[in-house]
């Protein structure tokens, strides 16, 4: 048996208004509802299609298929958010590592994951643990950036977990017991799964991590009933990998490539697509009206050594639109052809409408590691506009050298994997940014199965300041509505509400923030004691709105670890 489950361990720290966290005592667990009394509602396709209007639940990673991370709840407002208090805290009791989960909430039950791919269900009213699945690895995971897991999918009476050892596991929603377990890829070759799966029209959709190890990327769809694969789309094509030999980005920025040399070397390295990279780190967006899936594809492999992979290296560093029912190609837009800077297209796609020449257009957006927010026509992929840069840029697309080239943004971005939030009230996206000056230094390295294969190095520059930005960008103009400079580079995520508040963590100080969505004025902050490097959510229980976020740190930025999920609400009336 490759899994275990148990219930009963609470992991609960009860909180009451008026106490500060440092002064709290761990109290004995009060008698909570028995497991049989908790409703594990079966999530249907229709519920998922209507998730945007469902203020009560948070049913999928991005709140809805558009990945907007916007809720229609208005109880917590810009006026009363300064009174927000912790209502309960669930401590997972480990394992410790990058804690990046987005909890899902279904009719009063919260489903979350921990580092190393464990899954837990808790009562969303009290924080009492209902069941716990502890994943047993079949192979030692080979990972570059921490033992991440960003959450589950809940649908069809089951909870679906993608794992570090490249498996997809279906759990019984009521008990946490494994129902089926599918091996998606070979973990000994560097494949892993870190994203939250997506449930869509009778399929469970996942993508791989591992492009730092010379893997070939893909997106898969599986049957929710038996775990059999329905389709696979390779993010690295076996023909056409070379692309158009682009001298510039699609927007005209010079890439400083030696195209004659690349073309001359192509025959020598014609099979480089087999180890071409192209991770799909994050949960896709879907447009159900057109049955289109929008995936973001990360870096080529090796990350920084372009000499042994001549060509544009499709579909790395791209947004790719797929027919969701078949997994077939519709269009793509490659932000950085032949990337040698690790400028992954990794932050999830988000769907909204924008104004073009006085008319409304259905659009899809992406916050780039490049430091720009891109807005595309959803039907064709055509770029509508690119925002002003939300982080400093310097020596953009300068080729790395043996002695090193200083470049901004650094290898973490721009925007890292952090999901943005979009508010239809303000028509703004809220983007987390990082400022980390880095040296890019070239060297070559041979491929070895399961070994880190970067092909060069990028290092932070000692003594230079690092910090973050939190930026509101108007999607109709690409201009900033406001921007906040933050004390640390930001990795986490944003949440926008109809109450006029936008929430974010992201830094290493342990603070969780609330800002006025229109003006950027800081309204509230809370010190959690660990890096808030996960995306927050909103849900309602018994007619009351709550905000939840995981605080557990981040391996990439060495932010303080922890194991707590905080749930905040307005002070409870006596």
Image (tube, rainbow, N blue to C red):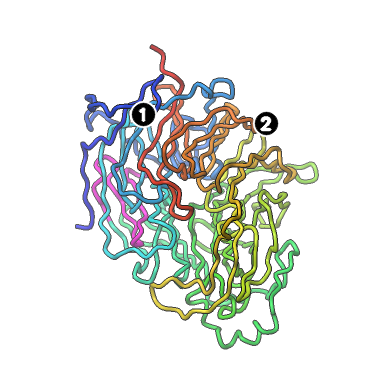
Q: Where does label 2 land, which residue?
A: 519
* Contact flag, marks 2 and 1 (Cβ < 8 Å): no
Magenta part of the protein: which range? 154-180
Task: Decide whether residue 168 is among the magenta residues.
Answer: yes
Residue 494: percent from the left, percent from the top? 54, 40
Could you tell which of marks 2 and 1 lies nearer the N-terminus? 1
Crowdedness of circle 1 by 10 Å Cα count: few (<14), some, many (20+)?
many
Mark linked to residue 26: none
Q: Which residue is at a point 54% across and 45% down the rendered structure image? A: 67
Q: Where does label 1 land, which residue?
A: 88
**Element on which disc 2 rests:** loop
The quadrant of the picture occupied by the N terminus is bottom left
Q: Nearer the viewer, residue 61 or 459?
A: 459
Q: How far apart in space, not on screen, are marks 2 and 1 (Cα)? A: 30 Å
Q: Which residue is at a point 46% across and 44% down the rendered structure image? A: 534
Q: Which residue is at a point 49% across and 63% down the rendered structure image? A: 279
In the rendered image, the residue lying farthest to the right is: 357
Residue 189: percent from the left, percent from the top? 38, 72
**Relative horizontal placement of residue 443, taking residue 198 as reference (left or right):** right
Residue 87 to residue 429: above or below: above
In the rendered image, the residue lying farthest to the front is: 463
Residue 372 to residue 334: above or below: above
Q: Which residue is at a point 63% across and 57% down the rendered structure image? A: 409
Residue 466: percent from the left, percent from the top? 58, 51
Crowdedness of circle 2 by 10 Å Cα count: few (<14), some, many (20+)?
few
Task: Decide whether residue 109 is among the magenta residues.
Answer: no
**Element on which disc 1 rests:** strand
The quadrant of the picture occupied by the C terminus is top left
Residue 201: percent from the left, percent from the top? 45, 49
């Amino acid at each position: 048996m490759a899994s275990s489950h148990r219930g009963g361990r609470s992991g609960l720290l009860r909180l009451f208004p008026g106490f500060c966290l440092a002064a709290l005592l761990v109290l004995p667990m009060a008698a909570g509802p028995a497991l049989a009394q908790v409703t594990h509602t079966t999530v249907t396709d229709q519920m998922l299609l209507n998730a945007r209007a469902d203020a009560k639940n948070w049913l999928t990673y991005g709140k809805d298929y558009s990945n907007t991370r916007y809720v229609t709840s208005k109880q917590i407002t810009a006026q009363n958010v300064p009174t927000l208090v912790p209502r309960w805290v669930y401590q997972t009791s480990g394992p410790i590592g990058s804690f990046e989960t987005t909890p899902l909430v279904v009719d009063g039950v919260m489903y979350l994951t921990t580092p190393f791919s464990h899954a837990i269900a808790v009562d969303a009213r009290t924080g009492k643990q209902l069941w716990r699945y502890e994943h047993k690895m079949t192979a030692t995971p080979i990972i570059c950036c921490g033992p991440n897991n960003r959450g589950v999918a809940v649908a069809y009476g089951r909870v679906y977990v993608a794992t570090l050892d490249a498996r997809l596991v279906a759990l019984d929603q009521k008990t946490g017991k494994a129902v089926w377990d599918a091996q998606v890829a070979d973990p000994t070759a560097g494949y892993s799964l870190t994203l939250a799966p997506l449930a869509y029209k009778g399929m469970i959709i996942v993508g791989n991590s591992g492009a730092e190890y010379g893997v070939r990327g893909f997106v898969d769809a599986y049957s929710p009933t038996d775990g059999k694969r329905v389709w696979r789309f390779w993010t690295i094509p076996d023909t056409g990998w070379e692309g158009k030999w682009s001298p510039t980005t699609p927007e005209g920025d010079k890439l400083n490539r030696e195209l004659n040399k690349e073309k001359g070397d192509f025959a020598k390295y014609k099979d480089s697509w087999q180890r071409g990279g192209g991770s799909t780190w994050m949960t896709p967006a879907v447009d159900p009206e057109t049955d289109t899936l929008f995936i973001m594809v990360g870096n080529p492999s090796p990350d920084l050594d372009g000499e042994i992979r001549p060509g544009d290296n499709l579909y790395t560093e791209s947004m790719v639109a797929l027919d969701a029912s078949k997994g077939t190609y519709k269009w793509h837009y490659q932000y950085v052809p032949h990337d040698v800077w690790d400028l992954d297209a990794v932050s999830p796609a988000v769907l909204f409408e924008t104004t073009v020449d006085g008319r409304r257009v259905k659009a899809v957006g992406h916050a780039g590691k490049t430091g720009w927010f891109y807005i595309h026509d959803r039907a064709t992929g055509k770029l509508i506009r690119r925002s002003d840069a939300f982080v400093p840029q310097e020596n953009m697309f300068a080729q790395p050298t043996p002695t090193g080239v200083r470049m901004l943004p650094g290898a973490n971005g721009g925007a890292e994997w952090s999901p943005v939030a979009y508010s239809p009230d303000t028509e703004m996206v809220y983007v987390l940014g990082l400022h980390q000056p880095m040296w890019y230094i070239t060297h070559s390295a041979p491929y070895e199965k399961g070994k880190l294969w970067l092909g060069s190095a990028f290092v932070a520059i000692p003594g230079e300041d690092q910090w973050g930005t939190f930026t509101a960008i108007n999607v109709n103009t690409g201009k900033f509505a406001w921007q906040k400079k933050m004390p640390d580079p930001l990795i986490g995520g944003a949440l926008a509400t109809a109450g006029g508040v936008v929430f974010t963590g992201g830094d290493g100080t342990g603070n969780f923030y609330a800002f006025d969505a229109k003006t950027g004025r800081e309204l509230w902050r809370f010190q959690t004691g660990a890096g808030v490097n996960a995306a927050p959510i909103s849900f309602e229980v018994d007619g009351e709105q709550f905000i939840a976020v995981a605080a557990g740190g981040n391996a990439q930025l060495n932010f303080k670890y922890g194991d707590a999920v905080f749930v905040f609400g307005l002070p409870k009336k006596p």
